[in-house]
Structures are given as C-alpha cells and as structure tokens.
Amino acid sequence: INILAIESSCDETSASVISDGKILNNIVATQSVHEKYGGVVPELASRAHQQHLVPVIQEAIKTSGLDKKELSAVAFTRGPGLMGSLLVGVSFAKAFAYSLGIPMIEVNHMEAHILAHFIDHPAPLFPFICLTVSGGHTQLVLVKSHLEMEVIGETLDDAVGEAFDKTAKLMGLPYPGGPMIDKFALNGDPKAYSFPLSDMPDLNYSFSGIKTAVLYFLRDRLKENATFIDDNKNDICASVQYTLIKMLMQKLKKAAKIHRINEIAIAGGVSANLGLRAELEKLSSELGWKVYIPSFEYCTDNAAMIAMAAHFKFLNQEFCGLDISPLAKMKIGK
Ligand code: ATP
Ligand code: MG
Ligand code: FE
C-alpha cells in the first residue's frame, strides 16, 4: 500500500508518502508571508498553498523512489482548518486521484495529530489518553483504537497555543510566539509572577482569562517601568508558561484518574514545548504514567501524520468520493 498524503489546513503546505505503514518522507513548506501580520492571513495562506503545493508534492514523490503509477490512494486533510486553505489540498487530491484512477481518503487533522504517535515506536497502547494542544485546539481525547476516538474534555474558549501566541504578541515578540516563549522561559523563574488558574467544570479548559490577565499585568508594570518587558523577558515567559502547563496538567491528571488510564500521550504544535515535555516526564515517574511524546518533526503541522492516519483508513477500506468537500469545523469521532 503506497499513499500520497497532503496537508493544507493552515499555513503549512506539506506532502508525504507512506509505504506499507512506513513514512518515506515528510516535505513541509512553511509560509513566511504571515510573519509581518502577526498571525495567519487566510487569503494569503490559500494563495501560498497554490504556489507551494505542486513543488512540495513533486518533491515527495521524487524522494519516495516510487513512480506515481505505484500509488494506491491519495489522502488529504478534510478539516478542521481554514476553508480556502483546505480547498487547495482537496481540489488537488481530486484531480490527482481522478487522473490516476485511484481512491481518495479524507483525514481529520486532529485525529492525525494523535495518530502521529504511530509513526515512531514504541506507540501508545490502547486505550490511551491524548492531550492535543495546538494553535486551534486543546482537547483531552480517549483513544480506543486507530479509528475510534472520543473527546472527553476541551477548551470552552481559546486554545492553549493561542494563549502562548497572544502572550508573545503582547510582549512584542514575532509570530508565531509559542516557540519564543518556550526559549525565553528556559532561563526564567516560573514563580517570578503569578497568574490566575482557570477552573472549569469536568474535564474542560479555559484559556481566555490568562490572556486578559497578562494584558493588564503588562499594562500596569509598564506604567511604572517602560522597559519592564525587556528587563524581565525570561521571567515573564517562564511564569506564563508555568501557569499554562499547570492548567493543562490539572485536567490531564483528573482524566487519567477518572478513566484509570496510565498510557498518556501529547500531540499538536504545543507538544513541542520543552517545559510541557519536562513536566510530563516528571509526572511519569511520580504517577507511574507511561508517557509518549512525539518527535519535534511530527508536533506541528505535517503530512506524515495525515499519511499515517490514511494508512489505517486504507486498511479499513475507508475511501471517499469525488463529491467530497472540506469542513472548516470537523469533530473527532464523527
Ligand atoms: P490546529 O491543529 O488546532 O488546527 P494549527 O494546525 O495551527 O492548529 P499546530 O501547527 O499544530 O496548530 O501548532 C501551532 C501552535 O503550536 C502555535 O500556536 C505555536 O505557537 C505552538 N507552538 C509551537 N511550538 C511551540 C513551543 N515550543 N512552545 C509553545 N507553543 C508552541
Ligand atoms: Mg502552523
Ligand atoms: Fe495542527
């Protein structure tokens, strides 16, 4: 089984070829046009996908060593994501599948973030709990099999990635700010400043409060000292990151306890965060968790995770027709 997979949900154009469950490559073109706007501009993202998609796919096919006639299926991200971005990938997949006479496989981007855990070994054992933390989502997912997942908790407002990015923006750091906060936090004191922890019911999260708290905190301190941010960059980053990780861990611990599961995974862009990774390693020895952390390459958006998800769907003969359309909002487990 050889599958070409395409990812175009946000601002990464990516293609990957998987052969009998083994990832052969993972070509990613990150769009830099958004940097000067401090966030992803949807219209520019679609155009950049149009420009990058064909070269990225050509590169993936070339470095796979396969001929396109040897492909068994074409997979693509159906959602969730930016409609204009998704359309570029879906439309290409349709034309490509039609011209080669091969089937298409639709993939849910959030399920794929989780299934990235099956690219490298050891993979988590079912059932496991995955904390998916990215730019648009923060979810606790009970993963029962490769194809069966259930959201058991999620953010009721902002995603944790957004909280990282917005904090960075308030501090005048360039986009995307998550990795910058991570970097400065390494040399800061996590207890230098304290920010309120949100307390949502059940296994749900809220990250909009901290954004406002950081806004007022910086505004007040800047009144007294105009160079407050520059003088205390490391401590501010460490303290905000500490608070965000603490909130993430509170509900993760609760979920593990309720479901009596100690196979714990993290996925999505924010799982690249060094502070989060370290905290999980700590909890793993404290609570007897078996913790799974994806390699950096598979944390942020990439087509290898789409290819991995498509492989499992192929084994289950789950294909879609040429009348398929993308979904900006797409739920897990539907
Ligand atoms: P979604 O997957 O929800 O549709 P997305 O695809 O935009 O959203 P990803 O690419 O999975 O999100 O992740 C991007 C997010 O990860 C951004 O918010 C970015 O700041 C954050 N991020 C990346 N690296 C780090 C890091 N080291 N520390 C904190 N945040 C990080
Ligand atoms: Mg991105
Ligand atoms: Fe993503």
Image (cartoon, rainbow, N blue to C red):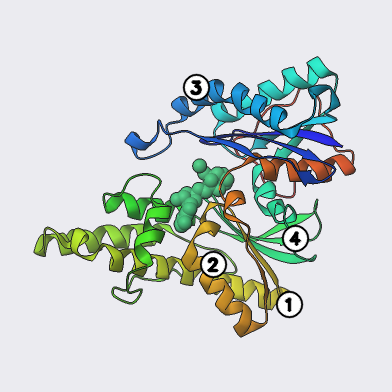
Q: Dot 4: within a 10 Å radius of its alpha carbon, few (fewer than 14), some, or many (20 or more) residues? A: few
The residue under the point 69% across, 51% down is: 116
In the visual, does 136 lie left or right of 100?
left
Helix, strand or loop at disc 3?
helix
Q: Which of the 4 image quarters holds residue 9? A: top right
Q: Earlier in the sequence, mark 1 or mark 2?
A: 1
Q: Which residue is labeled 4 in the image?
A: 121
Helix, strand or loop at disc 4?
loop
Q: Which residue is labeled 3 in the image?
A: 47
The residue under the point 27% across, 57% down is: 215
The residues tagged by marks 3 and 4 sit, at their Cα atoms, a distance apart of 37 Å
Q: Nearer the viewer, residue 225 or 257?
A: 225
Image location (x, y in percent) of residue 268: 58, 53
Q: Earlier in the sequence, mark 4 or mark 2?
A: 4
Q: Nearer the viewer, residue 152 or 1?
A: 1
Helix, strand or loop at disc 2?
helix
Inspect the image, locate mark 3, and give the three-letter code of the amino acid beneath it. Arg
The residues tagged by marks 4 and 2 sit, at their Cα atoms, a distance apart of 18 Å
Inspect the image, locate mark 2, and give the three-letter code of the amino acid beneath it. Arg
Q: Earlier in the sequence, mark 4 or mark 1?
A: 4
Q: Earlier in the sequence, mark 1 or mark 3?
A: 3
Q: Which residue is labeled 2 in the image?
A: 277
Q: Earlier in the sequence, mark 3 or mark 2?
A: 3
Helix, strand or loop at disc 1?
loop
- Closer to us: mark 1 or mark 3? 3
The residues tagged by marks 1 and 2 sit, at their Cα atoms, a distance apart of 22 Å
Q: Which residue is labeled 1 in the image?
A: 260
